Amino acid sequence: MSTQPAQAAPKPSFVRYDAVTKSYGAKGGALALRATSLDIAEGEFICVVGPSGCGKTTLLNMLAGFVKPTTGRVSIGDVPVAEPGPDRGVVFQEAGLFDWLTARRNVEFGLKMSGVPQKERQLRADEVLKLTGMLRFADRYPSQLSGGMKQRIGIARALVNDPAVLLMDEPFAALDAQSRSLMQEELLSVWRRTGKTILFVTHSVDEAIYLADRVVVMSANPGRIKADIRIEIERPRDEMSLEFNRLKRELKEMVMFEARQQELEA
Ligand code: ADP
Ligand code: MG
């Protein structure tokens, strides 16, 4: 009898980048992303880090359906991504709320545009406002909300269609350190309760190690995936722990190396 522990079966892939490349502009234009493949399981939390210009946003935008791959294919549950759709919710660095609408109306806006009746709209908006801890601020206008609260509304808005995938492009980059930590907690709690698949782009190695199941490290010129590292540290993660800091050093060195290469090539 074997004394080896049973190996967990690999989870089937849900989101799949299959040999994707991207060059912007005319044919033969600079390659923003070189043949990239990436598999993400359902419910996985993936963070993407790398120096600026390495193609993080391009990678995310292709899954969002904002940008078409030049070659290769991006799919969700075996369905190719062709355009933006309600199965993907997107959160940007700036919440981009309508100043003249209350928080609740901002969250409801997309539903209203797609003709969802008022009663159902309110029900669904309230549900995600509750999930992000914003229900009691639902009648405030954006000007009456802090940066962190605006981003919570941004997250609620992205969740209101009950998307399969949540896409976040440096969503906390503009926040002060304290609000950022709070938002990270908040997001993990939303993730735990909803089981969403999350693709989260960040400049911060600390943030990536704190949040992710897997950290994907990219390098530039052309953009490509350099490493894909599973974070096994149990949550809630202690940023002071030895293990956290060992990973942080490893990843920081990798990203710094890439940034230096980029500077030399520039
Ligand atoms: P990151 O998010 O990592 O900073 P991006 O995906 O924004 O990287 O950009 C990757 C590369 O593609 C960069 O060299 C950038 O200049 C180029 N790029 C991005 N968007 C466009 C665009 N719309 N038109 C032309 N070039 C672009
Ligand atoms: Mg970007």
Image (spheres, rainbow, N blue to C red):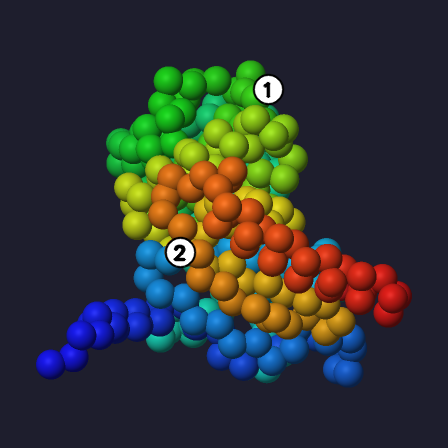
Residue at position x 48%, y 29% in the image: 182
Q: Quadrant of residue 192?
A: top left
For label 1, the SS is: helix
Residue at position x 80%, y 65% in the image: 262
| Disc assigned to residue 29 | none
- Density class for disc 1 (Cα within 10 Å; few <14, some 14-19, many ≥20) is few
Q: Is residue 164 visible?
A: no
Observer-nearest of 148 and 110: 148
Amino acid, disc 2: Glu
The N terminus is located in which quarter? bottom left
- Residue 39 in the image: x percent, y percent? 43, 71
Residue 9 located left or right of residue 46: left
Of badges 2 and 1, nearer the viewer stands 2
Question: Vertical placement of 118 versus 10: above or below?
Answer: above
Residue at position x 72%, y 67% in the image: 220
Observer-nearest of 254 and 16: 254
- Residue 193 in the image: x percent, y percent? 28, 41
Amino acid, disc 1: Ser
Cβ atoms under marks 2 and 1 closer than 8 Å: no
The quadrant of the rendered image in which ligand 1 is seen is: bottom right
- Residue 45 in the image: x percent, y percent? 42, 54
Question: Vertical placement of 19 versus 136: above or below?
Answer: below
Mark 2 vs ligand 1: CB below 8 Å: no
Q: Is residue 5 visible?
A: yes
- Residue carrying label 1: 143
**Sequence-first tag of 2 and 1:** 1
- Residue 33 in the image: x percent, y percent? 66, 73
- Residue carrying label 2: 232
